[in-house]
Image: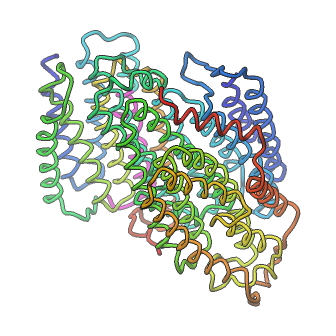
């Protein structure tokens, strides 16, 4: 394994905490975008030989997760013309604390997993689990619809990290399909956010409580 | 050839999208649906027995299980499409370009799910059904449908992301065993005994939770009452009968891998428990339910529970579950479409406002009542046969506890749902209910009548071609390979 792998993963993990801790939505978008770019670069290091397929995938991932989706979200944010504060249910300090606990548990848990011999001691699996955890944390503890989309993106990033172990096995068509679904998903969510902001003059999901028993 | 089944609806979507007339566009739906049905029947009848009809190097294949679900989806789609022109003519104030085109896309993606023999491709198609159906839910463009769409989209996407994680775990299970981890279904079934057991178990749980969210099993069902409550009846039918059936098929695929790996017990226990839990949760929320469409959503949760319960019990019950897939989907067509008509007639779907539906809209009212009797398992309708078969399977194999709880919950649901339905159909309509100009018509009544006729037929007599499809599918599911 390349020596750059672990440092890059540590940066990716640190970005989870940035995403939990910054108070401006733009900051969170930037953190998630940077993590997306890192994921693309990581794919280059995980496998020694990388064919034209790999290059395409890396290019696609960086382009989509690092630039297209964040651009689109920034656009949606500007369009919605809302306050740029995150408005968490759980405050920033506690979010970071919860994130840290989750990351620690992910480390412990991964060391007990029956991994293949070549993957033992890699930071990839704990980083994946920790990022999935962070994604769930953001999905549940943030009020604004756009923050929930960002939580979903973090969740996808975590799954992508695990997928790096399987890069050789996964056919390109499936990877492209997954990326395409992710993009379309965020696109549709963006449109819905636009409608939410027009309907309620806010994108807080606090307004979405009309339907209940 | 099987590729055509997917390309055709996509082309129809493009054609539909390019038609400028809001008035004539909905007529393309029955046309395209008929074309799809003819194509499906042609592909299946032409296929020689035992020929899996593979395409794209084994990525697509029409196996016995796939055949059954594909035919069912196509019939369901056709009957729904007959309702569409009449319904959309009533809603001529709303543009329907995106609506009509997306219905075709949903149909294409559902067909892709049934044909996929690559679990990654299946995942992509399943997520695509979520994305394509979101605009259908938002058809009414009001704050309530907005909330429903947001919840549907977010919970659906997060749930299905877990299924992707599970698919990766499954690939890792074969990587760990030193096998090629390509996620090809047939390969996985063949390799199943050698897969790494802990990873296989973890994969099953994640995939079950992920696709279970899409299916609407409790406790991952929270999006369902909101989504079905706000969706137009025709969309409710497509979701409750079609998309959920696709998610169920995805779970069946994973179950087959577990079964081939001699791990069926593990999967079955989870399925029996989750099946009964879904029925219980649905029963609790159906008692004193005042919103008729939300009631139907909980009924859907209940029946999804019955499906996984049937598979969990196994044997004869697995056959019953496959039959119930069809019966449930078609009966949901009766219920959602007639509830849609009643909603339109009264301008409300709360039982406080909706009374005397049999007087106000005689056809829709009586069909709603008949649909209720059918879905709760009263003879002589189809669901009675399939539910009885599942019960029979449970008792026959000595699983008395599961069978007993199943029967008890069916009873509670019957009483709970009955109270709401009778309140709707009986009594005299209020003045507010009479004010509206909506009346039963051929365009909005005949498709429901057709749904009802098939449900009744399936209760009395299962046509031999369907019987052989069902037997093949059940054998395919249960056979030890």
Q: Is residue B55 left or right of residue B367?
A: left
Locate residue B219: give its quadrant.
bottom left
* Magenta-drawn stretch, dominant element (helix, strand or loop): helix
| B27 or B111: nearer the viewer | B111
So how many labels did they put on this image?
Answer: 0
Q: Is residue B167 left or right of residue A130?
A: right
Q: Which residues are magenta?
A: A61-85
| B137 or B56: nearer the viewer | B56
Locate residue B240: give its quadrant.
bottom right
Asked whether residue A179 appears in the rendered view, the answer is: no
Q: What's the residue at 68%, 50% (across, down)?
A: B99
Q: What's the residue at 18%, 31% (across, down)?
A: A9
Answer whether residue A124 is magenta in the image. Answer: no
Give coordinates of residue B373: x percent, y percent: 69, 69
Quarter of the picture holding the N terminus of chain B: top right
Q: Is residue B275 left or right of residue B352?
A: left
Q: Is residue A110 above or below residue B372?
A: above
Give coordinates of residue B11: x percent, y percent: 72, 32
Answer whether residue A65 is magenta in the image. Answer: yes
Q: Is residue A66 above or below residue A133?
A: above
- Coloured how? rainbow
Give coordinates of residue A19: x percent, y percent: 23, 47
């Amino acid at each position: 394994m390349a020596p750059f792998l672990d440092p890059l993963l540590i940066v990716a993990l640190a970005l989870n905490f940035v995403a939990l801790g910054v108070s401006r939505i733009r900051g969170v978008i930037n953190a998630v975008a940077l993590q997306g770019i890192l994921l693309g670069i990581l794919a280059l290091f995980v496998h020694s030989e990388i064919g034209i397929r790999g290059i395409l995938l890396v290019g696609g991932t960086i382009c989509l997760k690092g630039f297209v989706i964040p651009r689109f979200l920034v656009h949606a944010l500007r369009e919605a013309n809302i306050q740029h504060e995150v408005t968490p249910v759980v405050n920033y300090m506690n979010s970071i604390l919860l994130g840290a606990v989750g990351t620690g548990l992910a480390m412990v848990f991964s060391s007990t997993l029956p991994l293949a011999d070549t993957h033992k001691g890699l930071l990839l699996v704990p980083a994946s689990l920790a990022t999935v955890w962070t994604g769930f944390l953001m999905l549940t503890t943030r009020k604004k619809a756009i923050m929930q989309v960002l939580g979903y993106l973090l969740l996808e990033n975590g799954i992508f990290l695990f997928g790096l172990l399987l890069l050789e096995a996964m056919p390109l068509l499936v990877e492209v399909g997954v990326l395409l679904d992710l993009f379309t998903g965020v696109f549709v969510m963006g449109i819905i956010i636009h409608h939410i902001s027009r309907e309620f003059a806010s994108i807080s999901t606090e307004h979405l409580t009309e339907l209940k028993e | 050839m099987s590729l055509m089944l997917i390309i055709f609806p996509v082309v129809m979507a493009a054609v539909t999208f390019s038609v400028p007339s809001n008035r004539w566009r909905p007529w393309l739906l029955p046309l395209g649906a008929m074309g799809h049905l003819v194509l499906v029947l042609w592909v299946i009848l032409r296929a020689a027995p035992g020929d899996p009809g593979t395409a794209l190097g084994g990525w697509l294949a029409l196996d016995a299980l796939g055949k059954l679900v594909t035919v069912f989806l196509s019939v369901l789609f056709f009957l729904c499409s007959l309702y569409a022109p009449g319904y959309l003519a009533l809603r001529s104030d709303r543009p329907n370009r995106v609506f009509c085109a997306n219905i075709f896309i949903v149909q294409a993606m559902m067909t892709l799910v049934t044909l996929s023999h690559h679990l990654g491709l299946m995942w992509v198609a399943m997520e695509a059904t979520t994305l394509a159906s979101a605009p259908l839910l938002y058809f009414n463009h009001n704050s309530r449908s907005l909330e429903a769409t947001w919840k549907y989209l977010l919970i659906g996407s997060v749930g299905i992301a877990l299924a992707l994680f599970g698919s990766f775990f499954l690939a890792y299970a074969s990587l760990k065993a030193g096998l090629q981890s390509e996620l090809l279904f047939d390969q996985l079934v063949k390799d199943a005994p050698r897969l790494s057991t802990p990873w296989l178990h973890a994969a099953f749980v994640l995939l079950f939770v992920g696709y279970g969210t899409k299916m609407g099993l409790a406790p991952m069902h929270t999006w369902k009452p909101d989504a079905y409550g706000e969706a137009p009846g025709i969309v409710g039918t497509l979701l409750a009968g079609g998309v959920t059936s696709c998610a169920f098929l995805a779970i069946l695929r994973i179950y087959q891998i577990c079964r081939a790996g001699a791990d069926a017990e593990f999967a079955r226990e989870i399925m029996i428990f989750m099946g009964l839990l879904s029925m219980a949760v649905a029963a609790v929320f159906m008692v004193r339910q005042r919103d008729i469409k939300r009631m139907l959503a909980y009924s859907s949760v209940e029946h999804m529970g019955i499906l996984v319960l049937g598979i969990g019990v196994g044997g004869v019950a697995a056959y019953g579950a496959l039959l119930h897939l069809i019966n449930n989907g078609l009966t949901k067509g009766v219920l959602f479409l007639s509830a849609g008509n009643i909603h339109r007639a009264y301008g409300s779907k709360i039982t406080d406002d909706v009374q005397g539906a049999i007087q106000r809209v005689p056809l829709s009212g009586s069909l709603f009542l008949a649909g209720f009797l059918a879905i709760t398992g009263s003879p002589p309708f189809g669901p009675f046969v399939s539910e009885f078969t599942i019960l029979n399977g449970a008792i026959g194999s000595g699983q008395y506890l599961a069978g007993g709880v199943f029967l008890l919950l069916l009873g509670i649901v019957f009483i709970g749902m009955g109270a709401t339905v009778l309140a709707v159909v009986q009594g005299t309509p209020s003045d507010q209910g009479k004010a509206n100009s909506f009346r039963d018509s051929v365009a909005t009544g005949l498709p429901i009548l057709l749904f009802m006729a098939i449900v009744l037929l399936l209760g009395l007599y299962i046509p031999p071609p369907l019987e052989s499809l069902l037997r093949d599918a059940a054998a395919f599911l249960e056979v030890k390979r």
